[in-house]
Amino acid sequence: MQKKIISLTTTTLSNPSNRLTFDWITVLLYLFSVTWGILNIFAVVYQPETAYFGLSLNSTKQMMFFGASFIVIIAIVAIDFRFFFNFAYLVYAGAILLLLLVLFLGSKIAGSTSWFRLGMFGFQPSEISKFATALALAKYLSSINIRLDHWQTRLTAGAIIGIPALLILRQGDLGSAMVYSSFIFVLYREGLPNSWFASYFAAIILFVLTLFVAEIYLIITLLSIALIVMLYIRLNIVRQMSRLLITTMIVTLVAILFVMSSDYIVNNVLKGYQRDRIMVLVNPDNAEIVLRAGWNIRQSKIAIGSGGLLGKGFLQGTQTKLNFVPEQSTDFIFCTIGEEYGWLGSLVIVSLFMYLLYRLILIAERQKDHFVRIYGYGVASILFFHFSINIAMTIGLFPVVGIPLPFFSYGGSSLLSFTILLFVFLKLDAYRGQMLSRT
């Protein structure tokens, strides 16, 4: 059976009529990232008196996950490229079913009921649901007569994104739920009005302001801005004056309600440890909060800063060796890079991801088929969110929310998920000449 799969893969790769020409630069970026990630995980767990390899070591497990990922890549190459379009909704339904099942049958780890335990390994359905959502959203938005300037389209697309996000939020995994907000970039690329895109970022800014400014001052500021705008409209006799006045009042009311609800959510809905993680950034001088929830960020920043320009060298990180930073193999793997490879190594990682994202967008834009282009933007958006939030988290610019660094952080579910996301896109790109006749 194994020989048959390898034979099928080799035939597919060598047959010009199949037009299977992978973007090998992206493949090399993937291989380099995963390999460097395994080395960093090894640096975290390595102790001179212990064996280099062992099933109990995270680095060994990650190598096994990489082997499993290679098998998945072979399967993706062997599957007919039409499968991903024709069965997109079925894959999405399967992911939703797993998210529902984990609520009742899952194990609780780190405060989140989002894992299935399989012996010594665990499986997190929320990871594979990102791929399923990107696939389903791409199929829906690429359908005939679907336009994002129609309310029905927006609501349906919002439901496709929102259902898995709400189920993951119900599991207690706020970080994974937040990833789904990255699909705003996909919607914007496919025609979401500028006002909606601007509102997304305005909401983020308002939420941040609620953390630093008292609610009453924000409301007074919003009302003052609205009053100035309405006076300008009246004095300049702008066309459609009545409509603009009504729009200004509605926007102001929505903004005030958002400020009030954000303040309520932070103080009454978020769990204590989640609120403390936010407050560490807002009030870093509060010793009580820092001691309670700021240890990870503080030690991560110390580790990164201690690396200097060129770092301490591979396996030479003192913060790493003495286990000062919790979850260093997973969420805080970037601080190992900063300590052992310094500012230069950190720059290489950032440049690596930026170039990978550039290539993904380049590949997406060359597609003749809307489905592949939309899916490609979904892949790029998810990777961008993970990369930017994880690094911001480790250097103290974002609260700790449990976002892994793609291809670097330890974890079988996340590595397999990112591998599937990436290589399905590369497979579809390889057949871009045939995608228009996929059905």
Image (tube, helix red, strand yellow):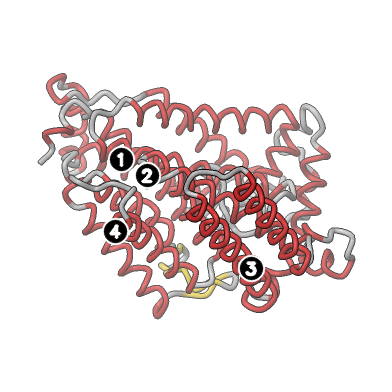
> Which residue carries the number 2 mark?
421
196 or 71, nearer to the observer: 196
In contact (CB < 8 Å): disc 4 and disc 3? no
Q: Which secondary structure lies at badge 3?
A: helix
Dot 4 or dot 3: first in sequence order is 4
127 or 437, nearer to the observer: 437
Q: Quadrant of the C terminus?
A: top left
Q: Is residue 367 above or below residue 40?
A: above
Badge 3: how crowded within 10 Å, few (<14), some, or many (20+)? many
Alpha carbon separation for disc pair 3 and 1: 38 Å
What's the residue at 52%, 41% (across, down)? 384
In percent of width and height, residue 40 lies at 62, 41
Alpha carbon separation for disc pair 2 and 4: 28 Å
Q: Which mark is residue 424?
A: 1
> Which residue carries the number 4 mark?
152
What's the residue at 16%, 40% (across, down)? 80
Alpha carbon separation for disc pair 1 and 2: 6 Å
Q: Which secondary structure lies at badge 1?
A: helix
Q: Quadrant of the N terminus?
A: top left
55 or 107, nearer to the observer: 107
In percent of width and height, residue 332 lies at 66, 50
